[in-house]
Amino acid sequence: MIRADLHVHSCLSPCAQITMVPSVISHVSKEKQLDFLSITDHNCCDNLASFDKKMKNSMIAGVELTSFEEVHILAYFYSISDALNLCSFVKRFLPKINYDPELMGYQIVVDEQDEFQKLEEDFLGIALQLSLSDLIEVVCSHGGIPVYAHIERRFGVLYQLGVFPKDERVRLAEARSKEGWVEAIKSGFVVLSNSDAHSPDEIGCRFTRFAMQYPDSKELVDILAAPSREKVFSLWD
Ligand SMILES: [Zn+2]
Ligand SMILES: [Zn+2]
């Protein structure tokens, strides 16, 4: 079994601590004995390449997207370039609002040595002008694997909409609790349990186990692409 926390925010997310830089996240990930991590910033992938350089083969490319209905979905990719293509496509659907980093949080692009590169100028913590269904289509057409994020919490699909929309393109749901897990399993989902860490101490507080002999990032994404309860074990499976 390998252990993965597939929902971690870097210093690019306005709501995350500015200490969420490559050296810190990589160190904590090793300390918590995680084989894989996914960096999933809000509506932007600009830190993925730096984290990948630092974490070598223990990172899965990911992003957390907000639909027009204010539903959060995660997307995972085989390659950083697929993730970057998706992010440059969705950028045009990000509404332009007045953004004050002091008040709303810094959005910092770093290199693999944690060195400051730039501040992202468009506020990322906001809903894209794309419906949930259209957003899922955009993820799939860019080679991504869509996942309903923290389903039973604010901005989760169950919390926002009350039900899972009928959509065969989504086979994975992320739960935060046993209650969420029960709802997801009843509806036929394979369940992930991740931290949604915004600070170093939260990394690995939840993780998912995958039935794999050796850590192999391509095999992990293969499992996510065709998930089954024989291979994916949340904290409650
Ligand atoms: Zn979220
Ligand atoms: Zn998140």
Image (cartoon, grey):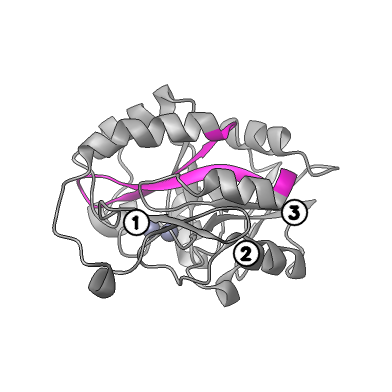
Ligand 1 within 8 Å of disc 1? The answer is yes
Q: Nearer the viewer, residue 227 or 72?
A: 72
Is 214 positioned to the left or the right of 63 in the image?
right
Q: Quadrant of residue 223?
A: top right
Residue 237 versus residue 190 in the image, above or below: below
Q: Nearer the viewer, mark 1 or mark 3?
A: 3
Residue range highlighted in magenta: 56-80
Residue type, mark 2 in image: Ile
Residue 58: within the magenta?
yes
**Residue 32, image x and y in percent?**
73, 69
Compare marks 2 and 3 and give the one earlier in the sequence: 2
**Residue 110, image x and y in percent?**
51, 56
Q: Nearer the viewer, residue 225 or 112?
A: 112
Residue type, mark 3 in image: Asp
User: Neighbour class for label 3 at 10 Å: few (<14), some, many (≥20)?
Assistant: many
- Disc 2 is placed on an element classified as helix
Residue 196 appearing in the image: yes
Disc number for residue 25: 2
Q: Nearer the viewer, mark 1 or mark 2?
A: 2
Q: Which residue bears the numbered disc 3?
A: 35
Is 158 positioned to the left or the right of 22 in the image?
left
User: Neighbour class for label 2 at 10 Å: few (<14), some, many (≥20)?
Assistant: many
- Disc 1 is placed on an element classified as loop
Residue 199: within the magenta?
no
Disc number for residue 156: 1
- Disc 3 is placed on an element classified as loop
User: Label 1, label 2: how many angstroms apart (C-alpha)?
Assistant: 25 Å
User: Label 2, label 3: how many angstroms apart (C-alpha)?
Assistant: 13 Å
**Which residue sits at x=28%, y=53%?**
121
Compare marks 1 and 2 and give the one earlier in the sequence: 2
**Which residue sits at x=23%, y=35%?**
92
Residue type, mark 1 in image: Gly
